[in-house]
Amino acid sequence: MSIASDHTGGHKARAPSFTELFSPKLLTVLREGYGFADLRADAMSGLTVAIVALPLSMAIAIASGVSPGRGLITSVIGGFLVSLLGGSRFQIGGPAGAFIVLVSLSVDRHGVDGLILATMMSGAMLVIAGYLRLGTYIKFIPYPVTVGFTAGIAVIIFASQLRDLFGLTLAGREPGELIPKLTALAQALPTMNISASALAALSIAIIIVIKQWRPTWPGILIAVVVAGVITWAMNLPVETIGTRFGGIPRELPLPMLPAFSLAKMQAVLPDAIAFSLLGAIESLLSAVVADGMAGRRHRSNCELVAQGFANIGSALFGGICVTGTIARTATNIRAGARGPVSGIFHALYILLFMAVAAPLVSYVPLAALGAVLAVVAWNMAEKDEFIALLKSSRGDAFVLLATFLLTVFVDLPVAIGFGVVAGSFLFLHRMAETVEVEGGTLATEDQADNGDDSTATTDFRDDVFVFRISGAFFFGATARVSTILDRIGERPRVFILDFSAVPLIDSTAAKALHGFVHKLQRSGTRIFFSGARASVRQTLAAAGLTAPVVSYSPSVEAARAEVKAA
């Protein structure tokens, strides 16, 4: 960030320009110098990420209630646009497990056309949010909220895969709510397919073993390929991508606008808002993780704009919600990516896979994809963080559990909304507790000469009171401060309130002081406010605390000198 001199001779930070805020990282990387070695590194890292993204994109799409082809389209179009336009060097965009719950509910309520319309509207909202520079505020979502809803999503994802993991046959449609879903699945246990269960167990075992012994190998892809080969070779009686969906497309469809009307847009608006909120959180969280791993800094508002255009582009081609994906982004960095070109390569590799290997995908058993998502759910649950927050404090534990339970049993937007509000109240309570008020009758000069500093400061009389407020004095701390000040029994001749340790004050606190000051005035007390910075003094003045009601002084010593001179 640039530094500019002000008229006082000091320095102040210059606000970043529009170009600095919204210039894609791809341009930054190219301007820094991009050679053949960088291109080769990005080509290899893009291939690594594509190998991870292939089965995940299909599995997430199926779990979301749409065809696997839509998941691949989302990775191609969304992944390409996120890397082309994004504000993070290493962000990989595509369908994410966190969206499974919201997308499946949207499909149930409005159909695939409604989902695509909601995705496009969500993209427009993200673009607007980015240009309004709202990306900066996403970081204010409390950590217990993110851990709570992530763990809740993990539980829902795992529950959504039980049917395919065990090859169950339900009498009717699988319920969306957790308890009815588990009840229906329990009733269908007699229909369990042993072959599907064995394939799921084998897939999970392969993923776990490879992660332990050969962590650089693409365990997920290997597990899916092995399960597909076994299914084809042994002609196992299990459900596959081919039997349920008829395979995947070999090329991208032509772009087209979804069918829409004003009534349809109003109907899907809540879904679009939920997509936007979760997409912003997930994308910027992923970008922050990438910054920590690579030692870089992303442009949050530019990233939101890119995510918005990626969602619009995905919807135009019939894809689903796009967001930054933490696992694939981390894989990209570990694979040696040099910049956004690796994400572009990742999208092109998936497109190539669709063109070449589409017929082979028909043999992939759904049990294997269910196993992939079961492992994803286990990894995304953030178990260690969950337990640590439960032990940290009762407030954090309450916010965490409330968000988690509301996510699992009610609704994700409700959970995030409640969590943010509860977390905000918890923060305000903690901030109010940090505000301190100290002081009382001033010591005599003889006591000061003897080094007795047991009181707030020194003076020459015992009918001069000094109180010092420390911390942010806002509405949350008003009652506490007012209670302490009101305990002053006998009204002093002089009352000095030291604001030198108050960084800010709001109108509620200023109004409370106004009432207290007028009580002292009626008793004939002279009031000084000392050490108040300009912003604090401005708020106090707006509440009517100006001369002659209050005298302002630069310090307690200056107020004392003025009292002596009077």
Image (cartoon, rainbow, N blue to C red):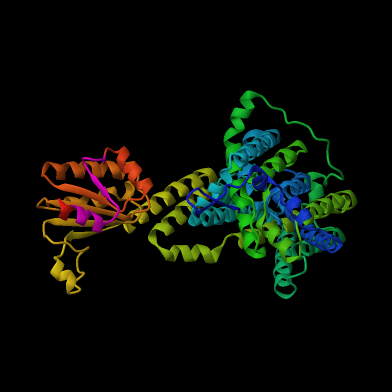
The quarter holding residue 245 reads: top right
Where the N terminus falls, by quadrant? bottom right
Residue at coordinates 50% horizontally, 45% vertically from top-left?
410
Q: Nearer the viewer, residue 428 or 311?
A: 428
Residue 315 percent coordinates (x, y)? 73, 38
Residue 368 visible in the displayed image: yes
Residue 349 percent coordinates (x, y)? 84, 54
Image side of residue 355 versus residue 343, left or right: right
Residue 188 percent coordinates (x, y)? 63, 51
Q: Is residue 548 magenta?
A: yes
Q: Is residue 265 magenta?
A: no
Considering only vertical position in the picture, is 417 above or below 372? above
Segment colored magenta: 545-562
Residue at coordinates 33% horizontally, 58% vertically from top-left?
434
Residue at coordinates 33% horizontally, 49% vertically from top-left?
476
Residue 238 visible in the displayed image: no
The quarter holding residue 366 reads: bottom right
Residue at coordinates 16% horizontally, 47% vertically from top-left?
526
Image side of residue 67 versus residue 177, left or right: right
Image side of residue 37 versus residue 123, left or right: right
Q: Nearer the viewer, residue 469 or 487?
A: 469
Q: Nearer the viewer, residue 37 or 71?
A: 37
Residue 135 percent coordinates (x, y)? 58, 46
